[in-house]
Amino acid sequence: IEKRILVSYILYSLYAPHPITMNPFKSALVSTFLKEKEQAVKVASTGAISENEQLIWVLWKILRGDGNDVCLTHPNPYLFLCTMFRNIKDILIDVPSRHSSDAI
């Protein structure tokens, strides 16, 4: 879940100086939010708590234009970002590298 929160925050922060309506990743963020929210509602109807509630909250804050609050609600915003960005190497490891021999 941490990776998905990190990716969501990165997609938001690339265009953070602009309104969310100008972010080209908005449709992906909305789609993910709706899908995850629907799944969380199903889990909640059984009396359980969805493990994706933190992701849903982050996406909700981003989509309503309060993305900067995501970091600020953590007791130590700097630690929050350091922790999240420390995990970026795990995300990048999954991306296949292109070698110069692959170039056209």
Image (cartoon, rainbow, N blue to C red):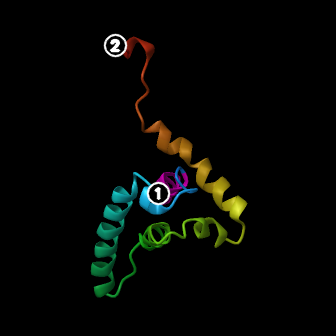
* Vertical side of 36 occupied by 49: above or below: below
* Vertical side of 75 occupied by 85: above or below: above
Magenta span includes 80: no
Q: CA distance from mark 2 to mark 1?
A: 32 Å
The amino acid beneath tag 1 is Ser
Percent x, y for residue 27?
Answer: 34, 58
Residue 58 is tagged as: none
- Looking at the image, which residue is at 49% across and 39% down? 92
Q: Give whichever of discs 2 and 1 has the lower sequence position.
A: 1
Percent x, y for residue 3?
Answer: 48, 54
- Looking at the image, which residue is at 34% across and 88% down? 47
Please give the residue where the numbered disc 1 appears in the rendered image.
8
- Looking at the image, which residue is at 58% across and 68% down? 70
Apparent side of residue 69 relative to residue 32 in the rendered image (left or right): right
Q: Which residues are magenta?
A: 1-13
Task: Name the foreground residue: 60 vs 91.
Answer: 60
Please give the residue where the numbered disc 2 appears in the rendered image.
104
The local secondary structure at tag 1 comes to: helix
Q: Residues within 10 Å of mark 1 (few under 14, many from 20)?
A: many
Q: Are marks 2 and 1 in contact (CB under 8 Å)?
A: no
| Quarter of the image that includes the N terminus | bottom left
Task: Name the foreground residue: 58 vs 86.
Answer: 58
Task: Name the foreground residue: 66 vs 47.
Answer: 66
- When asked about the image quadrant of residue 76, the answer is bottom right
The amino acid beneath tag 2 is Ile
